[in-house]
Amino acid sequence: MARTNSQIGTLKKYNCRRLILNYAEILKEKVPNLIFFDNEQFKFKRVIDN
């Protein structure tokens, strides 16, 4: 997850918003119940089951 957020940070630096959102959609399909994408901070976060 740290690597993914780092890559997103690099894309944010170059203002690649559409690419980030496409990347987020692909990853949400691959691991739907483990992570979610925070659109405000542009970071992936883990889903915590209580």
Image (cartoon, rainbow, N blue to C red):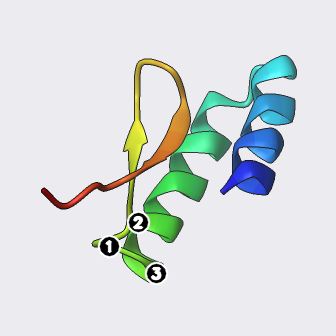
The residue that mark 3 highlights is 30
Specify the label residue 28 is tagged with: 2
Q: Amino acid at mark 2?
A: Lys
Contact check, label 1 and label 2, Cβ < 8 Å:
yes
Q: Split into 4 quadrants, where in the image is the C terminus?
A: bottom left
**Observer-nearest of 26 and 48:** 48
Contact check, label 3 and label 2, Cβ < 8 Å:
yes
In which quarter of the view is residue 1 placed? Answer: bottom right
Q: Alpha carbon of mark 1 to alpha carbon of mark 2: how far? A: 5 Å
Residue 9 falls left or right of residue 23: right
In which quarter of the view is residue 23 placed? Answer: bottom right
The residue that mark 1 highlights is 32
Q: Alpha carbon of mark 3 to alpha carbon of mark 2: how far? A: 5 Å
In this rendering, is residue 4 above or below 38?
below
Count residues near mark 3 (Cα–Cα under 10 Å), then give few for <14, some for 14-19, many for 20+: few
The image shows residue 20 at horizontal and vertical percentages of: 62, 42
Q: Amino acid at mark 3?
A: Lys
Kindly state the secondary structure of the residue where label 3 is placed.
Answer: helix
Kindly state the secondary structure of the residue where label 1 is placed.
Answer: loop
The image shows residue 16 at horizontal and vertical percentages of: 73, 30
In this rendering, is residue 30 above or below 44?
below
Residue farthest along the front direction in this orientation = 50
The image shows residue 41 at horizontal and vertical percentages of: 51, 21
The image shows residue 32 at horizontal and vertical percentages of: 32, 73
Q: Residue at x 76, y 20 (%)?
A: 15
Contact check, label 3 and label 1, Cβ < 8 Å:
yes
